[in-house]
Image (tube, rainbow, N blue to C red):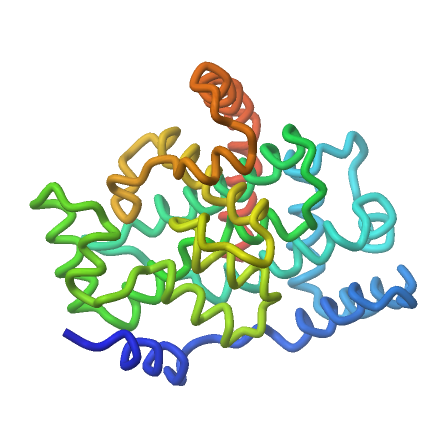
Amino acid sequence: MMSPETIKEKVQTIIQLPALPTIAMEIVDLVDNPKTSASKLGKLISTDQALTAKVLKIANSPFYGFPRKISTIDFAIIVLGYDALKEIVISISLVSSLQKKGDAMFDAKGFWDHAIMSGVLARRLARDLGYRVSGEVFVGGLLHDMGVSVLHRYFKSEHKRIMEIVRETDLTALEAEESVLGVTHAEVGGWLAERWNLPSHLVEAISMHHTPGRAENNKELVALIHCADVFAGRMAAQTVEFDKGIDFDQEALNRLQLTDAAALQDYMENYRELVKGDLEAVTQFEQTREA
């Protein structure tokens, strides 16, 4: 079995691991600068026609629920705000970088449906519970399981063995990963997030979404993404194999004041109905990966 140090080194040195596109990094830098004007930001995005089209497609989806059609980048910036725009750009860039065709050991469509639904539910849960977390809550939900994609792509034999254990035994997916690799997909995803220089609270949310009690930087964000992950898994049409055996962490529920079982079930049922309205958004997001 490879040591965690060896796995981490491999994850961080694999040449093929994609970097964020330059324009995405420039946009993020501009959004973070309080002196940036909407006009300057719009001009930068407009230099990339493919990105412009994808941003407008997502901006017009039910994710954001704006009643009028958003037809220009400048209008999108004014209506959605800088945080939402940053969220869209990062999401498009990272999903495009990580996209991978599925096989017998990796259901690519199921993986991305779960990722997108987790992002949607994390934002809804944050809003419903009154948490003023940043626009990156959707990005955290979207990327929380990206370590699974890394394992499938770069550790094929190990990933195959993990999936065989998950399918043939009563072990959880995390236990299977630990038995084969000595680390979990959450830790691997966190290492990749570090390599991409993502904000520390996103690195934490990705690496600790199954162990929210260990969070230090933003306990609420990690708890939100953890709970959204469990919600999404329970709402899935098919079993999410890489989350087999995962249940709510009590410390996360305490952090979000979701300790009442009846209230938790009410959220589940309400979100099940709300998610139906987001299916169009999921479809549009899938199409941005293929465009």
User: Which residue is painted at 55% across and 24% down in the image?
Assistant: 274
Percent x, y for residue 39?
Answer: 91, 63
Percent x, y for residue 141?
Answer: 52, 48
Of residues 280 and 129, the one drawn nearer to the viewer in this rendering: 129
User: Which residue is painted at 68% across and 49% down in the image?
Assistant: 135
Q: In the displayed structure, would residue 187 be above or below residue 258?
A: below
Left/right of residue 102 with respect to residue 41 in the rendered view? left
Image quadrant in which the N terminus is located: bottom left
Of residues 247 and 153, the one drawn nearer to the viewer in this rendering: 247
Left/right of residue 80 with respect to residue 195 in the rendered view? right
Percent x, y for residue 223?
Answer: 51, 43
Left/right of residue 6 with respect to residue 232 in the rendered view? left
Percent x, y for residue 181?
Answer: 21, 67
Image quadrant in which the C terminus is located: bottom right
Of residues 175 and 60, the one drawn nearer to the viewer in this rendering: 175
User: Which residue is painted at 42% across and 77% down in the image?
Assistant: 17
Q: In the displayed structure, would residue 88 be above or below residue 194?
A: above
Numbered label tally: 0
Q: Quadrant of residue 232?
A: top left
User: Which residue is painted at 54% across and 73% down in the image?
Assistant: 196
Left/right of residue 242 with respect to residue 56 in the rendered view? left
Q: In the displayed structure, would residue 58 be above or below residue 68?
A: below
